Image: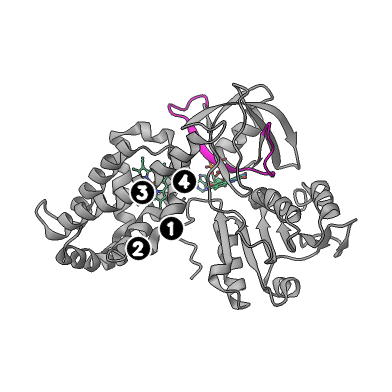
């Protein structure tokens, strides 16, 4: 346990962390990766280079400093990070590596000496925080391997089917190479996919949401052509090829109360977790409204699948949005809106908007929609999101 003096020292370092946190963690990652390049098997190199991963860590450290006397308040955020850690196979032996380089970076960036009281307090605090993560992650890993068909780390999956859904979106149907049973997952969860790419010294890891409800014989992901790994998957990975796949993780799932209406709002590849969520809501006879915006050539990618969902749903509405639609109107069941998802449009669709809101897209889109929803009076605890960038904990603030 930390002493009162240690807690005060940490709290007093919060403004410094806010101001210099990004510099601190940038130095930290540079030094750590230099000494442990094998960590590149787990980290998304783009998120490290564009600063989103350092910023996510800096924001967490700042929050930890503010809440050091009531860390339990950070538990929901810790659980979300723990899901990501389990998905990227963080091991308890790696916590001392991170701790060592963090403290060394504090010395270097903040000019602290070995015996400095703030530095000693942070050493002690890191151990406490690391223990919280390690305990939660060990439980989650245990749960994973105990499940029927469950596994630890990654295992090989064969691409059984590759389906072009639209010019930018391809679905991959993945089956375990060992033909074992697939563990259940909750709609909205994601897997980590590791690709062994030519010219890369390490495996390239990316997360992809499961783009369907649970199916006993395959996992489906839908990948948008975007950068390094997604282009490789689109262009080089064919039916019969093998990818390394983690167990499904993530907390972007429906709340237990199925009587409440639900709203799903997505853009671009953010549609992927919504497909399983919307199907689950329909099966629960839950009242749902889905709003999805995308580029004209991609926006109808799952229209047929959505038509089938609506045909079987008692109280559902699905609206596809694009400003270039000739006009707003209705297909058989799916609606089309010649609009962006802006505040007036949201207001016209959600009305009083009682219920839970699920958002998915880029961090910028997600932040914008959260802003509109808050202006429309939606309470922060009714807004849930998954952001497809590294910034899920830094840039996006609901409260
Ligand atoms: C929980 C979760 C679920 C996800 N689910 C899905 C999903 O279902 N489907 C999906 O398609 N994606 C999903 N993603 C995103 C996915 O993990 C990858 O981030 C995405 O495929 C892009 O990876 P990439 O290697 O192709 O692109 P990267 O090469 O990593 O590039 C990412 C983006 O950054 C840009 N970029 C790269 N380098 C630079 C630079 N130096 N300067 C400026 N811009 C640059 C690229 O143009 C690109 O737009 C999910 C992410 C998370 C965290
Ligand atoms: C107490 C210590 C730690 C804290 C506070 C922390 C914090 C974070 C945060 C905030 C994220 C972003 C989560 C998200 O995107 O939702 C993250 C992701 C990640 N962390 Fe940690 N972490 C810690 C320890 C570790 C350790 C020991 C490792 C092992 C190497 C590790 C490896 C990773 C990886 C690989 C990711 C995913 C990054 C990406 O590819 O985008 N972390 N961590």
Ligand 2 within 8 Å, label 3 CB: yes
7 part of magenta stretch? no
Q: Label 2 to label 4, Cα distance in Å?
A: 18 Å
Confirm or deny contact between disc 2 and disc 1 (CB under 8 A).
yes
Majority SS type along the magenta span: loop
Q: Label 2 to label 3, Cα distance in Å?
A: 15 Å
Q: Label 2 to label 1, Cα distance in Å?
A: 10 Å
Ligand 2 within 8 Å, label 1 CB: yes
Q: Label 3 to label 4, Cα distance in Å?
A: 11 Å
Q: If the image is split into quadrants, where does the N terminus sit?
A: bottom left
Ligand 2 within 8 Å, label 4 CB: yes
Taking the spot 83% from the left edge, 52% from the top edge, the residue there is: 312
Q: Quadrant location of residue 115?
A: bottom left
Total marks shown come to: 4
- Secondary structure of the residue carrying tag 1 is helix
Compared with 161, 329 (above or below) is: below
Q: Tell me the number on the disc at residue 63.
A: 2
In-front residue for pair 109/156: 156
x and y percentages locating residue 356 in the rendered image:
63, 66
In-front residue for pair 385/202: 385
Q: Tell me the number on the disc at residue 84.
A: 4
Compared with 378, 183 (above or below) is: above
Q: Range of the magenta residues? A: 197-218
Confirm or deny contact between disc 2 and disc 4 (CB under 8 A).
no
The residue that label 1 is drawn on is 77
Confirm or deny contact between disc 3 and disc 4 (CB under 8 A).
no
- Secondary structure of the residue carrying tag 4 is helix
Compared with 349, 142 (above or below) is: above
């Amino acid at each position: 346990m930390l002493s009162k003096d240690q807690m005060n020292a940490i709290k007093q370092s919060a403004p410094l962390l806010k101001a210099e946190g990004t510099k601190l963690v940038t130095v930290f990652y540079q030094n750590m990766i230099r000494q442990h390049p094998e960590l590149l098997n787990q980290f998304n190199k783009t998120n490290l280079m564009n600063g989103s991963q350092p910023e996510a860590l800096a924001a967490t450290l700042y929050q930890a400093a503010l809440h050091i006397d009531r860390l339990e308040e950070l538990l929901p955020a810790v659980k979300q990070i723990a899901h990501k850690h389990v998905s990227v196979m963080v091991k308890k032996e790696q916590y001392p590596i991170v701790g060592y380089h963090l403290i060394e970076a504090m010395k270097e960036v903040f000019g602290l000496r070995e015996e400095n009281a703030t530095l000693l307090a942070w050493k002690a605090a890191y151990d406490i925080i690391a223990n919280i993560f390690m305990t939660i992650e060990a439980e989650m890993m245990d749960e994973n391997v105990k499940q029927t068909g469950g596994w630890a780390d990654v295992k090989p999956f064969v691409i059984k089917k590759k389906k072009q859904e639209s010019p930018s979106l391809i679905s991959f149907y993945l089956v375990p190479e060992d033909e074992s049973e697939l563990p259940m997952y909750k709609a909205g969860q994601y897997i980590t996919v590791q690709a062994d790419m030519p010219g890369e010294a390490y495996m390239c890891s990316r997360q992809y949401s499961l783009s369907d409800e649970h199916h006993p014989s395959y996992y489906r992901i839908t990948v948008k052509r975007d950068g390094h790994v997604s282009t490789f998957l689109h262009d080089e990975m064919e039916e019969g090829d093998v990818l390394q796949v983690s167990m499904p993780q993530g907390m972007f799932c429906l709340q237990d109360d199925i009587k409440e209406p639900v709203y799903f709002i997505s853009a671009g590849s953010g549609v992927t977790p919504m497909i399983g969520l919307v199907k689950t809501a329909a099966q629960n006879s839950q009242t749902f409204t889905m709003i999805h915006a995308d580029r004209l050539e991609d926006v109808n990618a799952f229209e047929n699948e959505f038509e089938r969902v609506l045909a079987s749903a008692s109280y559902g509405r699905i609206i596809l949005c694009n400003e270039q639609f000739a006009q707003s109107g209705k297909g058989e069941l799916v609606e089309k809106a010649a609009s962006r998802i802006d505040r007036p449009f949201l207001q016209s669709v959600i009305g009083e908007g009682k219920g839970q809101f699920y958002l998915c897209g880029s961090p910028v889109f997600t932040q914008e929609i959260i802003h509109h929803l808050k202006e429309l009076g939606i309470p922060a605890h009714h807004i849930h999101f998954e952001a497809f960038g590294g910034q899920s904990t830094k840039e996006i603030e609901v409260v």
